[in-house]
Image (spheres, coloured by chain):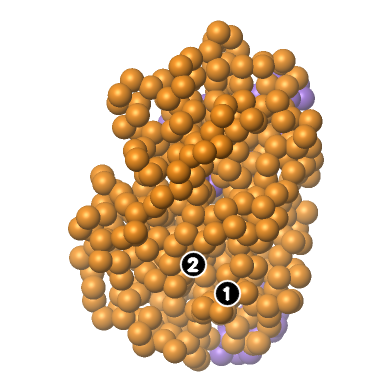
Chain colours: A purple, B orange
Amino acid sequence: MCLAIPGLIESISGEAESRLAKVRFGQIAKEVNLVFVPEADIGDYVLVHVGIAIARIDPAQADKAFTYLDEIGATGKVDEESA
Amino acid sequence: MKYLDEYRNAEAAKQYLAAIAQITTRPWAIMEVCGGQTHSIVKYGIADLLPAAIRLIHGPGCPVCVTPVEMVNKAIAIAQKPGVIFCSFGDMLRVPGSDCDLLSLKGKGADIRIVYSPLDAVNLAADHPERQVVFFAVGFETTAPANALAIHQAATRDIRNFSALVSHVLVPPAIEAIMTSPDTQVQGFLAAGHVCTVMGFTQYIPLAETYRVPIVVTGFEPVDVLQGIYMCVRQLEENRHEVENQYARSATAAGNRHAQQLVSTVFQVSARKWRGIGEIPASGLSLADDYAAFDAERCFDVADVSTAESAECISGLVLQGIQTPLACPAFGTTCTPEHPLGATMVSGEGACAAYYHYRRSTPSPASPNSKEQQTP
């Protein structure tokens, strides 16, 4: 039930509790409430749960899953055999 | 889709699997808290790809599964009342109550509607002022902001024919209950990424310290789960017990403060019963006094509903990670997703349903059952 899907904000209308976005998920676009992510703007990806955005996805953090092993090896925080 | 597909990359998954194998020197038991993670682990066969020394225990993080049968019975009682439109997320409809489920009631003519968002239920109430619209507000912290927003909107729009049957639960008290259980085998946790996206993860720091368990906030795609397992095993091997964040693209230490503010306005922390586990103090949310007028339990007289459950079902043990679905004699025989005995067979996030869909016929030497016997 805690499923939340990332989608791209294509347009925004309204303000405060009625600040709504058209958010694209692949071939599908849906109306999403942005009240909890006032910082989100057109072109951002937001994480959407039951029609409501709960976070703006941080693009700088998104690649870390793919660089993490190299990073911890490179910084020498772990033993050689752990890297 | 961006931010989904890349985390299903086989090469990245293989790198993490190799890295986990490299650092694992002895048996470890790690609980993934969230049902969405369980679904991913079973769907992608992650448990079988890990070193035999790593055992994944499926946690209680499926709200459909832990909603107590008396709450399902209350939903059924309310949905049968004349003039009611009962709204729910789809996965609650097939959860068995003592006598029937909401879906069979709908088949008999009750006005039960599946909604995508709780805000849809509020709009339905605005469109049907002559009817009572009740929303089944079930969920963990991830869903609490949406449900709080719906109730808050009903209040500000003065929609008085809307109410919510609230059965909200919280993750940290469940982790505490698991760690204080004498039967616990859990040595590390993958915390639920979306719960922490809303609530942050500072609440988990005292848990990690008190129970000396590593807790890694983890996402839901295979690469996320494998990175989370790697980070958790690394802590266990290094005898550390910290809170780390694998899911930093969405979850932050502080979480979403706008969402938290509204949740704490509309709801208050209260004791909650968990199906299969029992009552846990301060483990859920109820409506705050200012919003009591929207409490369906007050609006409808549903105090004396039954709480009888199937004696055959072991979902309580499955939810606590003490048994796996394959250990249940009813699994796949008298209990199937079409005819579930317990809630863990209903939701796609329930451990029993995930096993039924993805691994019914794989009692191989690498199955979790046999691993369980090998692991002290």
In the rendered view, does B225 fall on the left or right side of B148?
Answer: left
Estimate how packed mark 2 is, as few (under 14), some (14 to 19) or many (20 or more) residues with alpha carbons within 10 Å: many
Residue designated by label 1:
B181
Residue B286, numbered label: none
Image location of residue B48, percent across then percent down: 35, 73
Q: Is residue A7 above or below residue B172?
A: above
Image location of residue B183, percent across then percent down: 51, 78
In the rendered view, does B375 fall on the left or right side of B365?
Answer: right
Which residue is pictured at 60% across the width and 12% down the height?
B126
Residue B320, numbered label: 2
Give the residue type at disc 1: Ser
Image location of residue A50, percent across then percent down: 55, 35
Q: Please, which chain is the residue tagged with disc 2 on?
A: B
Q: Is residue B179 above or below residue A44?
A: below
Q: Please, which chain is the residue tagged with disc 1 on?
A: B
For the question of whether residue B19 can be seen, the reply is no
Decide which of B202, B158 is in the foreground and name it: B158
User: Are discs 1 and 2 less than 8 Å apart at CB?
Assistant: yes
Which residue is pictured at 44% across the width and 89% down the height?
B376
Report helix, strand or loop for mark 2: loop
Which residue is pictured at 72% across the width and 16% down the height?
B157
Decide which of B196, A30 is in the foreground and name it: B196
Nearest to N terminus: mark 1 or mark 2: 1
Residue B176 falls in image quadrant: bottom right
Q: Is residue B112 above or below residue B13?
A: above
